[in-house]
Image (cartoon, grey):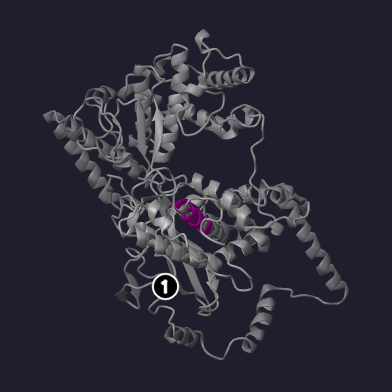
């Protein structure tokens, strides 16, 4: 990326750094005139004045960078929109969006800027109430002209195809118009721009504008404009779920073992100095194994599908990865982005208080321990939530409970397969990705093997291609309980979306017991149980009908029991007494403490060598402090205190330093102190204190 002739030392901030470090740093946000004069770095590859920005992403499930093309925007307007993009993250008094949200905001603004430039608008100050509606109308008109073949840029028609600021094609639906998501994204861009324009008046010399739409909720605007209804994600029908899980578990047995051996053989050849393609050719004679109960190897040979040797290896790695990802998402209910942000690899392990390093059956993001009863082992998954959060938040999911060492949840087995598959590939990871559980191959690298983080989009596309190869849904009937199964049968599972797995988990648990909505919400990491119930129950009429049918069936069964003189249990206490009375026949006559001690001392021990580590002391074990691979590591420069008095002391100190720096004419120091004071003031208000004003 060209630096437009400016030396690095001449810019504010010195050397280029990742966008999230720069934009969140104290004193980075200054007046627009200062940005124009110093041309600071906005990423590791781009400066403020560049027409193409490559904005670095922090979240592992995103691309390494997002591209924002400002080249179709007039110069003065371009600087204002660039400044608004940075300001959405850097201003201490604003909501401080995540880098992914800010990048999409910038892409939308670049498209809006191209439209403004086409119609002769040169500043945000020229936007007026209703401008958002005018833009969406102009976009719809342009799409109609493209469809009819009547669009003529020489006559002044706006062609949105030339101003597409993001990745891929224009976001057009089947009706030839903008998709629901695209309308919502552009509406949100106008609403956010209007909300920050009053602060831009001080920092960028632009006039504030209000009310770009008659409504200030982007989703409502999208619903009012889109001809196609918003597509609801449905739960996988039971008739689809059963063969899908069976096929995925089959791939994680002998096939997974074979692919792990194949990768090891490939890396051994690369270690001898061969390029990845040449190394793959050396192992073309790899012998695949036979699955128990089958007559022939599950794959005849490496090149059986007409691929090159290297492409065949990558294809097999993707197949095992996709099967494991499906099982983890079905077993945990997490979002795909949260799966791709998990940490893997070796690290210090606490075994009865003793540090040890050994081979483990699961990645470092998994811990285990006894439940309160002592009869079961609890498996926990530790990771980060990214959605709706500027900084990733560390969270814990329940992987499952197991009555014995041999009965592990299938999601835990899938995580173990992912660890074995990608452990040897982390040696070739780019900086910042070496600690991630799941990686992707960088196919642009020819001479050497390189692995990078895997975004959600390529994973979703890959899963849609993998499922038809490993699953057979040809025997499905036309429908199940009112759900149409035709599309699953015709595509052989290729129509399955990743978010259907999350909804499947939620509705399966809810169907067992609707009173579990609060724990379901905790597992889903949503805002509140009411939101989860709206998203997964209330807005799904088919699922509500299933629940009503099930309730009616249970009511009929109870009525028949009463008519036959079988008066069931009147209270929960009576039901518990009945269950407890049967326990002696099932559980030996040990106390719970004795049973757990016996299990811990058995061979292999629950916490012994080769086993997982207990939950206690996971900080520094599951998460590595300061490691760039840990997506939950905070990169915010504002290190604020933990309580009100400590934050208040920071506020007063920052204000004193700001006044002193301003009197000495030290602009950079003044800006840094101002940002810290604003952040401390905002934190105090969140704590319920009044920091006063200055």
Give the percent coordinates (x, y) of residue 613: 39, 72
Residue occupying the point 36% across, 62% down: 268
Visible in this render: residue 389? yes
**In the image, 579: left or right of 621?**
right
Quarter of the figure that contains the N terminus: top left
Residue 311 colored in magenta in the image: yes
Q: Residue at x 22, y 23 (%)?
A: 37
In terms of depth relative to the viewer, which is nearer, 271 or 178? 271
Residue 690 shows in the view = no
Residue 177 sits in quarter:
top right
Taking 209 as reference, is 218 left or right?
right
Question: Which residue is disc 1 drawn over?
Answer: 612
Q: Which residues are magenta?
A: 310-321
Measured from the top left, where is residue 328 in percent x and y?
53, 60
Q: Eyeballing the image, is 375 above or below 318?
A: below
Residue 610 belongs to the span the image colors magenta? no
Residue at screen point 42% across, 42% down: 63
The percent position of residue 35, horizontal first and vertical second, equals 26, 26
Viewer-proximal residue, 197 or 432? 432
């Amino acid at each position: 990326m060209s630096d437009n002739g400016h030396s690095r030392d001449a810019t504010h901030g010195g050397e280029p750094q990742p966008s999230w470090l720069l934009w969140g740093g104290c004193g980075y946000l200054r007046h627009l005139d200062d940005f124009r004069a110093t041309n600071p770095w906005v990423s590791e590859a781009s400066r403020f004045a560049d027409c193409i920005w490559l904005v670095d992403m922090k979240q592992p499930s995103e691309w390494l960078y997002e591209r924002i093309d400002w080249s179709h925007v007039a110069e003065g307007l371009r600087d204002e929109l660039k400044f608004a993009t940075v300001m959405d993250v850097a201003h201490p008094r604003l909501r401080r969006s995540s880098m992914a949200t800010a990048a999409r905001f910038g892409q939308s603004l670049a498209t809006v800027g191209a439209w403004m430039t086409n119609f002769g608008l040169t500043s945000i100050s020229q936007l007026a109430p209703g401008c958002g509606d005018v833009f969406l109308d102009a976009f719809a008109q342009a799409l109609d002209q493209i469809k009819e073949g009547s669009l003529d840029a020489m006559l002044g028609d706006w062609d949105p195809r030339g101003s597409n600021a993001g990745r891929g094609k224009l976001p057009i639906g089947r009706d030839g118009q903008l998709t629901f998501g695209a309308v919502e994204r552009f509406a949100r861009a106008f609403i956010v721009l209007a909300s920050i324009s009053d602060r831009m008046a001080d920092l960028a010399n632009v006039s504030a504008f209000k009310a770009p739409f008659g409504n200030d909720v982007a989703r409502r605007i999208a619903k009012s404009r889109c001809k196609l209804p918003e597509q609801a994600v449905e739960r996988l029908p039971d008739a689809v779920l059963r063969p899908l899980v069976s096929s995925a578990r089959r791939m994680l047995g002998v096939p997974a073992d074979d692919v792990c051996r194949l990768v090891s053989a490939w890396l051994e050849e690369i270690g001898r100095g061969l390029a990845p393609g040449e190394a793959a050719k050396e192992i073309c004679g790899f012998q695949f194994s036979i699955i128990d109960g089958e007559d022939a190897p599950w794959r005849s040979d490496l090149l059986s599908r007409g691929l090159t040797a290297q492409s065949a290896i990558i294809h097999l790695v993707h197949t095992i990865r996709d099967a494991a990802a499906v099982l983890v998402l079905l077993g945990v209910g997490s979002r795909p982005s949260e799966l791709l942000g998990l940490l893997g690899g070796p690290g210090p392990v606490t075994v009865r208080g003793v540090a040890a390093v050994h081979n483990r059956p699961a990645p470092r993001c998994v811990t285990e321990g006894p439940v309160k009863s002592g009869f079961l082992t609890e498996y926990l998954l530790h990771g980060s939530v990214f959605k709706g959060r500027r900084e990733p938040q560390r969270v814990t999911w329940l992987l499952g409970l197991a009555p014995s060492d041999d009965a592990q949840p299938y999601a835990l087995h899938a995580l173990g397969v992912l660890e074995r598959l990608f452990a040897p590939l982390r040696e070739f990871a780019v900086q910042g990705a070496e600690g991630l559980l799941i990686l992707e191959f960088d196919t642009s690298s020819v001479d050497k093997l390189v692995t990078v983080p895997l975004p959600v989009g390529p994973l979703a596309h890959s899963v849609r291609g993998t499922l038809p190869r490993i699953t057979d849904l040809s025997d499905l009937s036309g429908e199940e309980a009112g759900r149409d199964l035709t599309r699953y049968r015709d595509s052989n599972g290729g129509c399955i979306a990743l978010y259907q797995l999350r909804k499947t988990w939620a509705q399966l648990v809810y169907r067992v017991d609707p009173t579990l909505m609060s724990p379901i919400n905790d597992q889903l990491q949503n805002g509140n149980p009411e939101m989860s119930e709206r998203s997964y129950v209330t807005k799904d009429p088919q699922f509500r009908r299933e629940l009503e049918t099930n309730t009616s069936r249970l009511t009929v069964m109870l009525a028949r029991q009463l008519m036959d003189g079988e008066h069931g249990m009147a209270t929960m206490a009576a039901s518990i007494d009945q269950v407890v009375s049967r326990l002696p026949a099932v559980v030996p006559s040990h106390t719970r403490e004795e049973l757990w001690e016996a299990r811990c001392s058995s061979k292999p021990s629950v916490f012994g060598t080769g086993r997982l580590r207990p939950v206690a002391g996971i900080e520094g074990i599951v998460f590595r402090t300061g490691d760039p691979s840990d997506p939950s590591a905070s990169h915010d420069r504002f290190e604020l205190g933990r309580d009100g008095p400590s934050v208040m002391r920071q506020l007063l100190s920052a204000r004193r330093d700001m006044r002193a720096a301003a009197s000495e004419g030290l602009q950079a120091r003044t800006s840094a102190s101002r940002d810290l004071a604003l952040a401390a003031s905002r934190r105090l208000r969140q704590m319920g204190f009044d920091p006063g004003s200055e």
